[in-house]
């Protein structure tokens, strides 16, 4: 059976703001602009999962 993944957060590169759901937003202090997009999203997704902000099937997308 395929594992379904869902976007549960959006990272805005221009402002460095990570928004999760409709009521949580975080200003990311670390400069992630030097990282490749996939690496940046993996790092943000792992952080959000570790903090229980998204589910195990949740992902962070980027705009």
Image (cartoon, rainbow, N blue to C red):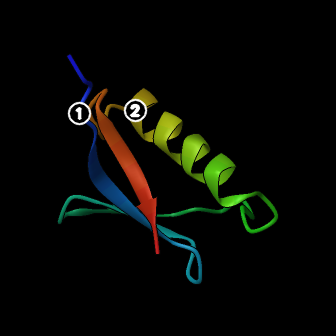
Circle 1 — which element?
loop
How many C-alpha atoms fall within 10 Å of the one at disc 1: few (<14), some, or many (≥20)? few
> Where's residue 38, x and y in %?
63, 51
Q: For residue 49, which numbered disc appears in the image?
A: 2
Give the residue pinned by disc 1: 4
Q: Residue at x 51, y 34 (%)?
A: 46
Q: Nearer the viewer, residue 46 or 27?
A: 46
Picture quarter containing residue 42?
A: top right
Tell me whether circle 1 and circle 2 mark residues in contact (CB < 8 Å): no
Q: Residue at x 26, y 25 (%)?
A: 3
Q: For residue 25, which numbered disc appears in the image?
A: none
Q: Nearer the viewer, mark 1 or mark 2?
A: 1
Q: Residue at x 53, y 47 (%)?
A: 44
The answer to whether residue 55 is above or below residue 19 is above
**Quadrant, the N terminus:** top left
Mark nearer the N terminus (1 vs 2) = 1
Circle 2 — which element?
helix
Q: Quick one: which residue is furthest to the top in this view?
A: 1
């Amino acid at each position: 059976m395929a594992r379904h993944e869902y976007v549960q957060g959006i990272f805005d590169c221009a402002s460095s703001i990570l928004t999760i759901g409709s009521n949580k937003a975080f200003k990311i202090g670390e400069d992630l602009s030097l990282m490749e997009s996939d690496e940046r999203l993996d790092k943000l997704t792992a952080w959000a999962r570790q903090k229980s902000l998204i589910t195990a099937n949740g992902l962070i997308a980027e705009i």
